[in-house]
Image (spheres, rainbow, N blue to C red):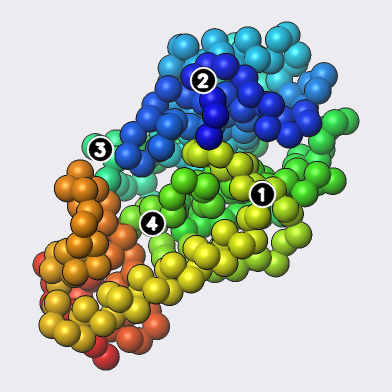
Amino acid sequence: MNFAYGEPAPVSPGIVRVVANNPSPLTFKGTNTYLVGMTELAIIDPGPLDDTHLAAILKAAAGRPIRQILVTHAHRDHVDGAAALQAATGAPIMGLGRDLIAAEGPSVNPQGAEFIDYVFTPDVKLAHGDMINEKEWRIEAIHTPGHAPDHLCFALHGRGIIFSGDHVMAWNTTLVAPPEGSMSDYVKSLQRLLERPESLYLPAHGGKLDEPQRVVKAYLLHRRWREESILEAIREGAGTIESIVPVVYPTIDQKLTRAAALSVQAHVEHLIARGLVTCDGSPTWDRHLSPA
């Protein structure tokens, strides 16, 4: 991924990427903000609340009117900059929103105390299949829950391009962390993308994906393999999520242990739903698990 923070980089005709300076073990180099259009613009994922990043977006816009601010999901590294960008441009904020999703946070999460805007309410609420029509573009909202219940991908019609947010990324597999994340929803959403024809994905973190269908299939295979390894660990006596983590992630960086435990929890919930594992109550990290 070749880039410089704050510098607009063309990634496809009429599409420019600006990378926010918020790198981390879970955001890679930072959040990608996309400017779509030639004489008028849609902004996809305005990124974190950061005056420097806002200035870089406005500089890249170069005076062209911004018609929409599209948000893939309400994690703060994607949505916190939306209000400031709206104040500077007057553009409506569009996304699925969280009013139908429980406004509560996990007791343990991988990104710090507050990484979700639990009350995010866009000016225009989008549902699966909704179209955003302008002279220069037609953008379709695709509901892809899994990483987040409100996650949307955006398909740019006539171009074979999907802005894949955190659902499919080039640098790593997507974190699915309960209760925000659902492995069952995530697998179904990946399968939904396999039914589509687009040949280029532009993710919210990392570089572009030129063979996205191959990557989606690899993601599904990876999840299947991970679930099989977790099930095997349970069969061999690893009876809690805490004890499974070092078995399936033997070389993990200690800074990512919490994220790994949440990923294992998501897989365990999926195994329970499929009748392959039993648990006496909700599968918390120390609760005993058994093969069905």
Q: Label 1: state its secondary structure.
A: loop
Relative to the observer, which residue lies in front, 159 or 284? Answer: 159
Q: Which residue is mark 3?
A: 112
Q: CA distance from mark 2 to mark 3?
A: 26 Å
Mark positioned earlier in the residue sequence (2 or 1)? 2
Q: What residue appears at the point 47 percent right and 46 percent down from the top-left corner?
A: 171
Residue 110 position in % (x across, y down): 27, 45
Q: In the rendered view, tell whether residue 76 sits above or below residue 89.
A: below
Mark positioned earlier in the residue sequence (2 or 4)? 2
Q: Which residue is mark 1?
A: 210
Q: In the figure, residue 191 lies in which quadrant?
A: bottom right
The reply to whether dot 3 and dot 1 touch (C-beta < 8 Å) is no
Q: What residue appears at the point 47 percent right and 24 percent down from the top-left corner?
A: 20
Q: In the rendered view, tell whether residue 184 sits above or below residue 55.
A: below
Q: CA distance from mark 4 to mark 1?
A: 24 Å
**Left or right placement of residue 115 versus residue 184 in this view:** left
The reply to whether dot 2 and dot 3 touch (C-beta < 8 Å) is no
